[in-house]
Amino acid sequence: MSKLTILSKEQDVVGTDKYRVNDPLIPMAFRANAQMTVNPNADGTNHQVTVMIAKPVVVTDPNGIVSAPATFRMTTKFNAIQDRVNNTERLAAIDAHIEFLTKNKQAIADGILPTAPAVFTVDL
């Protein structure tokens, strides 16, 4: 396993930051990557924040040919409303999302609904 490192850093508050595993032993096409994109709407009242992680599934066939026929991918989106200053609510929504992902991690990985409902600690 290798860690993601910054590949391309935007110099503005909008745009895209890109990360990639920087392991020379892994071919470029098979390296995990991530990106965070911030897109403002036309009137400046909202920034759509998208965070995406992609982890190619690398396999070797019986002839020794290495390929990545599939990718595990996860995307999270957040509407960062720009014409409101409700920072407590803004952060609570993010905290609840993180808690939801954490508590349902295995079910998400398995592609199923959890067998029991999660109990949350974050106030919304």
Image (spheres, helix red, strand yellow):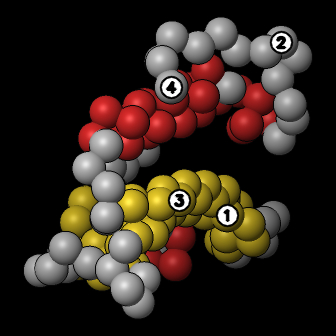
The residues bearing labels 1 and 4 have C-alpha atoms spaced at a distance of: 33 Å
Residue 54 is drawn in which quadrant? bottom right
Of the two numbered discs 4 and 2 on the same chain, state the one appearing first in sequence: 2
Which amino acid lies under the numbered mark 2 shown in the image of this protein? Answer: Ala
Decide which of 110, 16 is in the foreground and name it: 16
The residues bearing labels 3 and 4 have C-alpha atoms spaced at a distance of: 18 Å
Residue 91 in the image: state x and y as whole percent.
35, 37
Disc ID at residue 77: 3
The structure residue drawn at horizontal position 54% and vertical position 55%, both measured from the top left corner, is 76
Residue 47 in the image: state x and y as whole percent.
38, 70
Q: Residue furthest bottom?
A: 42
The residues bearing labels 3 and 1 have C-alpha atoms spaced at a distance of: 19 Å
Q: Are marks 4 and 2 in contact (CB under 8 Å)?
A: no
Disc ID at residue 71: 1
Report the mark closest to the observer, 3 or 1.
Answer: 3
The residues bearing labels 1 and 2 have C-alpha atoms spaced at a distance of: 28 Å
Report the mark closest to the observer, 1 or 2.
Answer: 2
Left-right relation of 13 to 18: left
Q: Are marks 1 and 4 in contact (CB under 8 Å)?
A: no
Which amino acid lies under the numbered mark 3 shown in the image of this protein? Answer: Lys
Of the two numbered discs 2 and 3 on the same chain, state the one appearing first in sequence: 3
Left-right relation of 30 to 36: right
The residues bearing labels 2 and 3 have C-alpha atoms spaced at a distance of: 25 Å
The structure residue drawn at horizontal position 39% and vertical position 59%, both measured from the top left corner, is 80
Is residue 113 something that shows in the picture?
A: yes
Dot 4 corresponds to which residue? 124
The residues bearing labels 4 and 2 have C-alpha atoms spaced at a distance of: 21 Å
| Secondary structure at numbered mark 4 | loop
Of the two numbered discs 3 and 1 on the same chain, state the one appearing first in sequence: 1
The structure residue drawn at horizontal position 26% and vertical position 50%, both measured from the top left corner, is 85
Left-right relation of 44 to 56: left
